Image (spheres, rainbow, N blue to C red):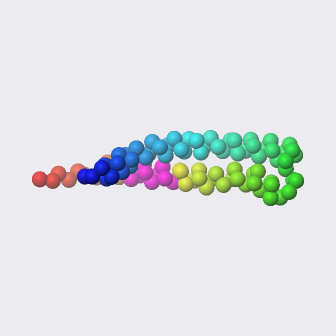
Amino acid sequence: MNVWNKFWKWYEDKILGSIIIIAIIQFIQVPHMVWNADIMLEAGLVSRIHPVIDWFLYGVDLIEIISIINVGMIMFALIKKRRASKNQPKIIER
């Protein structure tokens, strides 16, 4: 096995931990999104000046929902794959 393949094998073994960290960071964005929208849009400091500005202020946080769903799906797929590989019988080569 060459160095490149060893690196990718190592990376694949560690990717679930990285995804869990990313997921935690993404999931804590949900309360921030609600808080930020309440403060910024209800305070009237920058809201309702122009619809494009409102979209950027609120809409950019909403784009994170796609990332949150994606990270959840990646975590599920990786956990499912890892469980399936652990449940398969090992083949011993001679």
Residue 22: x %, y % from top left: 53, 44
Q: Is residue 81 above or below residue 22?
A: below
Q: Quadrant of the rendered structure where residue 43 is?
A: top right
Q: In this image, 33 relative to 67: left or right?
A: right
Residue 70: x %, y % from top left: 55, 54
Residue 6: x %, y % from top left: 31, 49
Magenta residues span 73-83
Front position in the image: 17 or 5 = 5
**Majority secondary structure of magenta residues:** helix
Q: Can you see residue 90?
A: yes
Residue 31: x %, y % from top left: 68, 41
Q: In this image, 7 relative to 32: left or right?
A: left
Q: Residue at x 58, y 41 (%)?
A: 25
Q: In the current view of this chain or complex, which residue is farthest to the bottom? A: 52
Q: Is residue 20 above or below residue 89?
A: above
Q: Can you see residue 83?
A: no
Q: In the current view of this chain or complex, which residue is farthest to the left? A: 94
Q: In this image, 85 relative to 17: left or right?
A: left
How many numbered marks have been drawn onto this rendered protein structure? 0
Q: In this image, 26 relative to 55: left or right?
A: left
Q: Residue at x 49, y 46 (%)?
A: 19
Q: Residue at x 85, y 50 (%)?
A: 47
Q: Residue at x 86, y 57 (%)?
A: 50
**Does residue 88 belong to the magenta stretch?**
no
